[in-house]
Every structure is written in structure tokens, then in C-alpha cells.
Image (cartoon, rainbow, N blue to C red):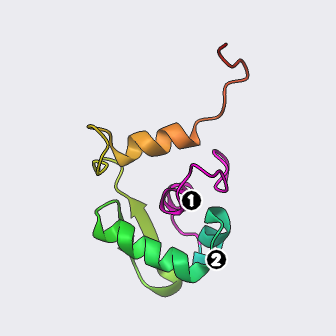
Amino acid sequence: MAGLDPYHPLLKRATAVLLAVATDPAASLQRLADAAGCDARHVSRLLTDLERHGYLERNGRGRARRFVVLWDAPLYHGGGQTVGDLLTLLSAEPSPHPKP
């Protein structure tokens, strides 16, 4: 899963899971856990929290389960920013020409 390294100390696990779901909505809990750097049980709890806070929805059950990121959902302390704004920022490829 390309983009910002999920092990970066400034990136919270929930945000790493949300980014992983946005990248692969049909990913298994284990794949999401690998992307977020935590175990599958922790990812399961994070997904429940993200759903409860309105950042994603679950569709289907078992192997047919898919997650849908709610891109237009406002961030809790986002100053008008949305989940989509955050994910776009995090998934952006770094510039080959950094500004001085």
C-alpha cells in the first residue's frame, strides 16, 4: 500500500487503518493490520470506532465484507476538513523536488 509509511510515529493507527481501507476496501483484517502495524483484533476495534464516528461503513459479511470510506465526512477537529482531505494528503506521493 503506497503512500505515507504506516509506521511513521506521527501517524495514528486509526488513520493508518483508514488509509489502508481506502486503498483496498476488500482487504482482510490481517492485511489491514499489516498495513497499520498492529494486530487484527486491534484493527477490528478501530474499524468499529471509525464506523461509529461516521468515517466508514461496512457492507456485507464474512469474506464478502467490504468497507466504504465516507470521504465527505468532516474530521472531528478538522477545521472544515474532511476524511477525503486527510486521505488525499496522506496518500500523495512525495515531491521529487522538495521546497527549501
* Residue 97 vs residue 61, the one in the foreground: 97
Which residue is labeled 2 in the image?
A: 30
* Residue 50 vs residue 57, the one in the foreground: 50
Q: Quadrant of the N terminus?
A: bottom right
Q: Is residue 83 above or below residue 13?
A: above
Q: Is residue 43 above or below residue 35?
A: below
Q: Is residue 52 magenta?
A: no
- The local secondary structure at tag 1 comes to helix
Instruction: Please provide the residue range marked out in magenta.
Output: 1-27
Q: Residue drawn 28% across and 62% down?
A: 54
Q: Is residue 5 magenta?
A: yes
- The local secondary structure at tag 2 comes to helix
Q: Residue drawn 55% across and 83% down?
A: 41
Which residue is labeled 1 in the image?
A: 20
- Percent across and percent down for residue 27 are 58, 70
- Percent across and percent down for residue 66 are 46, 71
Q: Amino acid at mark 2?
A: Gln
